[in-house]
Amino acid sequence: MSASKEITYTGRIVDNKKQAPILGAKVKFVYPGNAIISYTDIEGIFQLKINFSSKESIYGKLIVEANGYKTYYSSMKISPQPRDLGDIKLLEPHDIKLFNSDTDIFIPIPVIATILAGLFAIAIIAMQTSNSKFPVRQHKNSINIYQP
């Protein structure tokens, strides 16, 4: 039976737009039978110390929570080698991630709301102009008598 070995994984949590470190973010790695929790320092750096009892990799989920940001989730496989996990960029709640690529594009919700309002206004105008082509029969309370 092999002895347990503690491996340290480091990373940094930053604001996606400003690239500024986020202080006090909660970083949790959850894997079968355990959960490791760490908090970021003033430079946004965290350390996760995980005990390995074998040379096999561990599959788990990394969860990052910080006030004013969307919660970050990532499934990952870690090996029993110390590793820098790099920068993890958190999004503010009013940003929507449109694409998942190296050149992330973000569209703020107010822009989306303005576009939807414009489309709604165009639809209303189109419906009003299309209704004016078909006369509406109006019934009156009077009787018309046709006399030649």
Image (tube, helix red, strand yellow):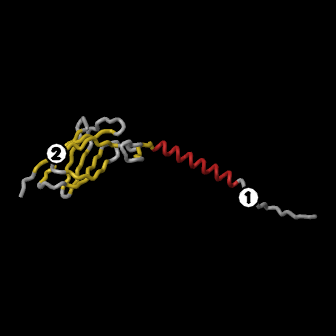
Q: Nearer the viewer, mark 2 or mark 1?
A: 2
**Residue sticking out furthest to the front:** 102
Residue in the foreground of this view, choosing between 99 and 112: 99
Residue type of the residue flagged with mark 1: Val
Provide residue 59's location: percent of width, then percent of height.
Answer: 22, 55
Image: 85 above or below 144? above
Residue placed at 24% from the left, 46% from the top?
27
Q: How many marks?
A: 2
Tag 2, which secondary structure? loop
- As drawn, is 78 to the left or to the right of 72? left
Provide residue 23's location: percent of width, then percent of height.
Answer: 26, 38
Tag 1, which secondary structure? loop
Q: Say few, some or many: other residues with alpha carbon within 10 Å of mark 1 (under 14 / 14 to 19 / 20 or more).
A: few
Image: 141 above or below 94? below
Provide residue 45's location: percent of width, then percent of height.
Answer: 23, 39
**Residue denoted by label 2:** 82
Provide residue 40's location: percent of width, then percent of height.
Answer: 23, 40
Residue in the foreground of this view, choosing between 11 and 44: 11
**Residue sticking out furthest to the right:** 148
Residue placed at 21% from the left, 42% from the top?
84
**Quadrant assignment for the C terminus:** bottom right
- Dot label at residue 136: 1
**Quadrant assignment for the N terminus:** bottom left
Residue type of the residue flagged with mark 2: Pro
Question: Decide: marks 2, 1 in contact (CB < 8 A)?
Answer: no
Q: Say few, some or many: other residues with alpha carbon within 10 Å of mark 2 (under 14 / 14 to 19 / 20 or more).
A: some
Residue placed at 24% from the left, 49% from the top?
28
Q: Quadrant of residue 95?
A: top left
- Marks 2/1: CA–CA distance: 77 Å
